[in-house]
Amino acid sequence: VRNLYLARHGQTEYNVMDRIGGDSSLTELGHKQAKALGEYFKGQEINYVFTSMKRRSRQTAQYVVDNMPNCTVIPLLEFDEIDAGVCENLRYAEIKEQYPDIALERSEDKYGYVYPKGEGYITLKERVDRGLKKALFLSGNAERVLIVGHQAINRMILSHFLFRRQEDVPYILVPQNSLFHIISTQQKKLFELVKFMD
Ligand code: G3H
């Protein structure tokens, strides 16, 4: 892959409510963001788009592939958002109220903390690495590949390309109006953050 693009899904109903997990759909703004992402790629054919199995990721990708008849879309379970276990579908404020120990422990070691009955960044690594390997294998020497991921997933993918201390990875900013573009040449990897909407 020469050009790897990494985008996050557009804003969702859960994002607005500060709720985590679940499988909510894009909001009106989310659709606008996804449309702007699609417009950014107009005229530069993407060969493969990898999504998660979640609605928000697939809805976002749809705007990109709509006018690309030769693009292959592959949803991968490995790119599903971090499983927050007992905290799935809760607001961050509700987690603080109902599970103060979880909120505290996680704030002390966000990378190493594993949600009861769920995952943590530390356990996510293996699955995301597997997904990335799969995606790179399936797309072979394609010129342009896009992954439409999630906040935690994109942080883990980015940790391969950005030099960050492990404990800083769960705090990497993953905006919904920008994408990361990683260009691989024989000598080096170049990296740019592209804002596609205000
Ligand atoms: O839980 C879902 C979020 O997208 C990950 O965010 O690790 O910053 O809580 P967080």
Image (cartoon, rainbow, N blue to C red):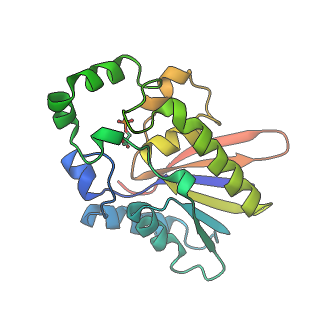
Q: Is 79 on the left or on the right of 186, as rendered?
A: left
Query: Is residue 32 placed above or below 86 in the rendered structure?
Result: below
Image point 16% across, 31% down: which residue? 98
In this rendered view, identify the residue nearer to me: 76 or 2: 76
Image coords of residue 121 (percent x, y): 49, 33
Q: Quadrant of residue 170?
A: top left
Tell me the quarter of the picture where residue 115 sits.
Answer: top left
View extreme (front): residue: 117
Q: Is residue 184 above or below residue 160?
A: below
Name above or below for residue 160 compared with residue 100.
Answer: below
Number of numbered callouts drawn:
0
Q: Quadrant of the N terminus?
A: bottom right
Q: Nearer the viewer, residue 167 or 95?
A: 95
- What residue is rendered at 25% in x and 21% in y? 101
Q: Quadrant of ligand 1?
A: top left
Q: Camera-side residue: 92 or 144? A: 92
Image location of residue 126, percent across then percent down: 61, 38
**In the figure, is residue 191 to the left or right of 186?**
left
Q: Residue furthest right?
A: 186
- Residue at the extreme top of the image, as rendered: 108
> In this rendering, would 86 be left or right of 93?
right
Q: Quadrant of residue 190?
A: top right
The percent position of residue 151, horizontal first and vertical second, equals 43, 44
Q: Residue at x 43, y 65 (%)?
A: 60
Residue appearing at x 14%, y 29% in the figure: 97
